[in-house]
Image (tube, helix red, strand yellow):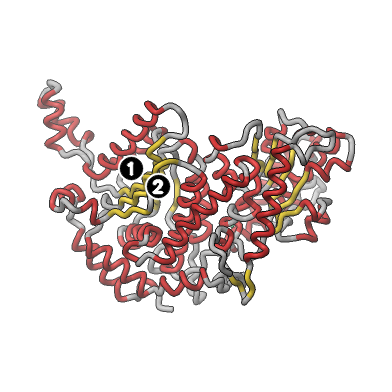
Amino acid sequence: MTRLSELPAYNKLRAHRAEIEGLHLREMFAADPQRFSRFSLQLDDLLFDYSKNRITSETVGLLTELAQQADLERWIGRMFGGEAINETEGRAVFHVALRHQANTPMTVAGQDVMPAVRTVQQQMRRFVDALHSGAHLGHTGRKLTTVINIGIGGSDLGPQMVSTALRPYWVEAIDVRFVSNVDGAHITEALRDADPETTLFIVASKTFTTLETLTNAKTARRWLVEGLGSEDAVAKHFVAVSTNLNEVKRFGINPQNMFEFWDWVGGRFSCWSAIGLSIACAVGMEQFEQFLAGAASMDQHFRNAPLEQNIPVLLGLLGIWYTNFFGCEAQAILPYDQYLARFPAYLQQAEMESNGKRTDRQGQQITDYQTAPIIWGEPGTNSQHAFFQLLHQGTRLIPTDFIAAANPSTELHDHHQLLLANFFAQTEALMQGKTAEQVHAELSAAGASPATIAQLTPHRCFPGNRPSTALLFERLTPRSLGRLIALYEHKIFVQGVLWGIYSFDQWGVELGKQLAKRIIGELANDGTVPKHDASTNGQIAHYRRLREPSSR
Ligand code: G6Q
């Protein structure tokens, strides 16, 4: 493997970056009436407009050259071929099989996984249908209408984000909630107005050993058994989603109530598996299948489109362009859709846990280029009234992704027009900026004195030339949502390949977990002195002093 920074196209891109330094997007649009059609693509109803980025045709040519030199096409083939490309964990990365539509095999280590995938999907359908029809009732014979998913990280963020996004599709009388934090406040609030007779718990954990999830699941179990006065209630009110049958049994959940998935499904890529059971409970299995089909349409595009017309590839390359050649430290995700409120948080995990790494595939430290930027964002228009100031006039350059549907998910069409007017206005404003001449003219027209004009002009100018990419599609549906998520998943894949890292492990979350396990045993007020650094010891001692006697 040649390091990214040693690829021939990398050096060419550095030189090219210096050449285009002085170019302003405003001028590039003025000079090229074809710029929009040159730098936009359409996949069915999805418009991918990347023309408001600081690129020329040469940039795109060099970036795709870089991707070729990094062997991207071979890596895409390896992922879809079920190869064990997650080498540090010795696993395939095969979430694409979970949404595979054709009647063709998808193999891992010579074995077709599709029969097992379809079997679990059928089991999900039977369960969800029974839940909705009332064929599966609670211990006291009542319908289960509150579904609480207990999981964390990949076993929470995906299902939670998708369920939130698809709120208008929820079947009648269903209420789906999510508990992830080990902070007792989370489960307390989720249970506050819940009725044990009508509550179903989905314990979602790939390993079924995660401290937070098991702690919450035990609390939920106690609440249920106390509420219904019988251990037998667990059978009707608890199901598990896991790869670990033994631990599920040990917890006391009947294996018949377990939905299986496999080690080739990474946690943060698992909402397509039975980890999506809470989504299916919310919207029904047919809509869940539409969600899978939407993702599959992006998989096909990613697998087959040439690099320079490949949306996830281009989105990934734009990120590389800004991170590695402009020194950008952050990437803003701005859905103009309240139902996508959790999408930035979801991508924070997907991108930062996948590509927030400093060791390359050869085990060498990466010292001469950056990997994953900081992902953040909030829905428009709220974000406009909060942090857009920094995007427009701050000292940092922050590339932005604007995401919106042309049609609303509500009846309030007038609201939607206003929302989209802002969507268009913001990408235009970021790109165009406002010159001193414009500010001057505005202030003069408003009757400002020359002194006021001189004082205010520098503050009221916008530099512009701030990049944005727009994703605009017909409507937020299970299908278009599946396609959108798959687009970002593949973007992450592309970037990981180019950065030369393993995107599908997450060793960085281990150390804190190990230390926490050790510290749990040290919190007792038994006179022992914890064996840490002075700061950690001091914090623990202060905590022991402040803690109320009842919790000692
Ligand atoms: C995701 C990570 C991580 C994981 C959680 C929950 O890719 O692996 O976020 O999903 O730690 O793990 P379990 O599903 O095993 O409880």
Q: Which disc number belongs to residue 332?
A: 2
Amino acid identity at mark 1: Leu
- Residue 533 lies in what quarter of the image? bottom right
Q: Earlier in the sequence, mark 1 or mark 2?
A: 2
Is residue 83 shown left or right of residue 449? right
Quadrant in the picture for the C terminus: top right
Q: Quadrant of ligand 1?
A: bottom right
Q: Which disc number belongs to residue 391?
A: 1
Mark 1, mark 2: which one is toward the viewer?
Answer: 2
Distance of mark 1 from mark 2, alpha carbons? 9 Å
Q: Is mark 2 within 8 Å of ligand 1?
A: no
Check disc 2 and report its element: helix, strand or loop.
strand
Does residue 194 appear in the picture of this structure? Answer: yes
Amino acid identity at mark 2: Ala
Identified at 25% across, 58% down, the residue is 55
* Most foreground residue, 150 or 512: 150
Residue 502, given in percent of the width and then of the height, sits at 52, 68
Q: Residues within 10 Å of mark 2 (few under 14, many from 20)?
A: some
Q: Are marks 1 and 2 in contact (CB under 8 Å)?
A: yes
Q: Residues within 10 Å of mark 1 (few under 14, many from 20)?
A: some
Does residue 323 appear in the picture of this structure? Answer: no
Quadrant in the picture for the N terminus: bottom left
Specify the farthest residue to the top: 447
- Residue 406 lies in what quarter of the image? top left
Is residue 60 shown left or right of residue 320? left
Is residue 320 shown left or right of residue 166? left
Identified at 31% across, 71% down, the residue is 65
Check disc 1 and report its element: helix, strand or loop.
helix
* Most foreground residue, 475 or 206: 475
Residue 455, given in percent of the width and then of the height, sits at 17, 30
Q: Which disc number belongs to residue 515?
A: none
Identified at 36% across, 69% down, the residue is 67
